[in-house]
Image (cartoon, rainbow, N blue to C red):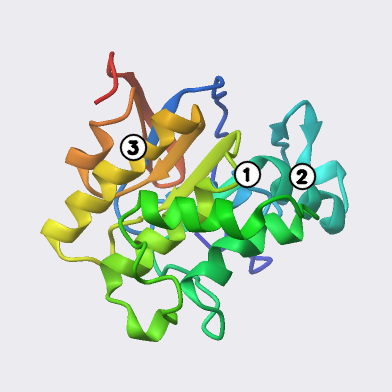
Amino acid sequence: MTDASGSLTILHDVSFSVTPGETLAIVGASGSGKSTLLGLLAGLDLPSEGSVTLHGKDLFAMGEDERAALRGQHVGFVFQSFQLVGHLTALENVMLPLELRGETAQVRERAQSMLERVGLGRRLSHYPRTLSGGEQQRVALARAFVTRPDILFADEPTGSLDTATGEAVIALMFELNRDAGSTLVLVTHDRSVAARCGRILTIEAGRVASDEWMGAEV
């Protein structure tokens, strides 16, 4: 809703915590605020008020460079639109987060191993435009997990894929997440995908409508 000042309130009094190793799905109708919430949790967007604490640090008390450095050390991302760098090969895309962290030890080997892990060992030198949507998302998964992030944020990771490809990508994402021991925060409109998580947070009109524990994760 837009008030007299022209401002738009997207989220209202949203408060929750996520424990290490947890898998949390954020669900809701289009326009409910779930992707906005994910952007705030990752420190990609700034709120008008409130705080998000990651590794004991308030993201919004930090400058953008500090937030970027914290994300680089602890956070992985998977987006609906893949967000691969078009002029880099699959291997170079996966090497990139390691290089941005200043790592030099076996960067190429680690990136190649991750691409082999997601079934793209024969696509190392391919550019994103020559890969299918499913292959691009597999590169994105390899890039996200090559740093073994403490927390992974995934925003509608199957939204641009057909059903069969999406199911294969989701299964791979959960498998990689278990292997890495990462915390997973997943935004999805697909209840069957959400049900694979240990917890489901439902957002309606910018508010938490329910917070359900699902038991053992799939």
Q: Are marks 2 and 1 in contact (CB under 8 Å)?
A: yes
Residue furthest to the top: 215
Mark 1 closeness class: few <14, some 14–19, many ≥20 residues within 10 Å: many
* Rendering coords of residue 146 (x, y %): 55, 48
Q: Measure the alpha-carbon separation of dots 1 and 3.
A: 16 Å
Foreground of the two, 80 or 135: 135
Residue at figure coordinates x 46%, y 35% from the top left = 184
**166 relative to 24 in the view: left or right:** left
Which residue is nearer to you in this view: 66 or 5?
66
- The extreme left residue here reads 164
**Residue drawn at (51%, 31%), measured in percent from left and top?**
182
Between discs 2 and 3, the one toward the N terminus:
2
Amino acid type at image mark 1: Val
Q: Nearer the viewer, residue 180 or 165?
A: 180
- Work out how far the residue at label 2 is from the one at label 3, CA to CA, in angstroms: 24 Å
Q: Amino acid at mark 3?
A: Phe
Query: The C terminus lies in which quarter of the figure?
Result: top left
Q: Which residue is mark 2?
A: 70
Q: Is residue 13 left or right of residue 78?
A: right
Residue tagged 1: 75
Q: Is residue 91 visible?
A: yes
Residues 13 and 51: in front is: 51
Provide residue 103's location: percent of width, then percent of height.
76, 52
> Is 140 positioned to the left or the right of 148 in the image?
left
Tag 2, which secondary structure? helix
Query: Residue beneath label 3, please?
Result: 174
